[in-house]
Image (spheres, rainbow, N blue to C red):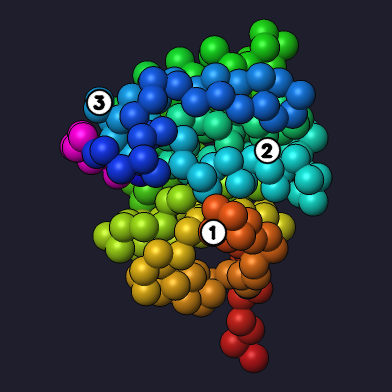
Amino acid sequence: MALVPYVENSLPALSKLHNSSAQFRFANHDLSLAQDWKKLGVAAVVWDAAVVMCMYLELGKVELKGKEAIELGAGTGLVGIVAVLLGAKVTITDREPALDFLSANVKANLPPESQGSVVVSELSWGEGLERYPAGGFDLVLGADIIYLEDTFVPLLQTLEHLCSDDTVVLLACKIRYKRDTDFLSMMRQQFGVEEVYYDKQRDIHIYKALKLPLKSDL
């Protein structure tokens, strides 16, 4: 979600982030995602959490066909693109500066027959939520979106708005700092949260969340 300034980094582990594109094969499709770290920073590179989320979606443990899904902080759009290819109708969102880049990736990687199943839309967490149907999604997806403390409260407000009692939230993330577990603790006040997948090689966790039922006053 955050846009950060470009900093040249010679570490081999980060060199892939500076490539102009990243190639993948998901849902029987070859995908080529443009990347532009210099222009958009973290919003315009494919992070491991997105790759692991796509791997998890391919496992078929979450029903996608015909489902209404929304991706938050989509960046390059990889997760939303794969969800569309697996049969979902997806609203792919990010902040306004990333939208042209995101839209180009979506258009370039979805076949014509799938273009009608996707919408690219601006969403800054906690703002303008009335533009999105309350509880209107079957699935909410987020890959590597819980790393900035300033966004935790608006992100939870956004999840609360988008989710019905039956909405499944899937978050893929690397637990880097105490603040990451702090977010999960905050989320557990409103959602039932469980870890459903762990990629040891990439150190990525996937958490599944469902809204907790409202407590009765009786």
Nearer-the-camera pick, 170 or 19: 19
Query: Residue 47 appears at what percent x and percent y?
Result: 46, 42
Residue 68 bears which disc, if any?
2
- Quadrant the C terminus occupies: bottom right
Separation of residues labelled 2 and 1 (CA atoms): 29 Å
**Quadrant in which residue 182 is drawn:** bottom left
Please state which amino acid type lies under the numbered disc 2: Glu
* Residue placed under numbered mark 1 in the picture: 203
Q: Residue furthest top?
A: 112
Q: Closer to the camera: disc 2 or disc 1?
A: 1
Query: Residue 28 appears at what percent x and percent y?
Result: 76, 24
- The segment highlighted magenta reads 2-8
**Quadrant in which residue 176 is drawn:** bottom left
Please state which amino acid type lies under the numbered disc 1: Asp
Q: Main secondary structure of the magenta part?
A: loop
Residue 39 bears which disc, if any?
3
In the displayed structure image, the side of residue 164 where residue 46 appears, left or right: left
**Magenta-drawn stretch contains 5:** yes
- The numbered mark, 2 or 1, whose residue comes first in the sequence reads 2
- The numbered mark, 1 or 3, whose residue comes first in the sequence reads 3
Regarding mark 1 in the picture, which secondary structure is present there? loop
Regarding mark 3 in the picture, which secondary structure is present there? helix
Please state which amino acid type lies under the numbered disc 3: Lys
Q: Residue furthest bottom?
A: 218
**Magenta-drawn stretch contains 64:** no
Separation of residues labelled 1 and 3 (CA atoms): 27 Å
Q: Closer to the camera: disc 2 or disc 3?
A: 3
From this viewpoint, is residue 5 visible? Answer: yes
Query: Residue 61 appears at what percent x and percent y?
Result: 79, 51
Regarding mark 2 in the picture, which secondary structure is present there? strand
**Quadrant in which residue 50 is drawn:** top right
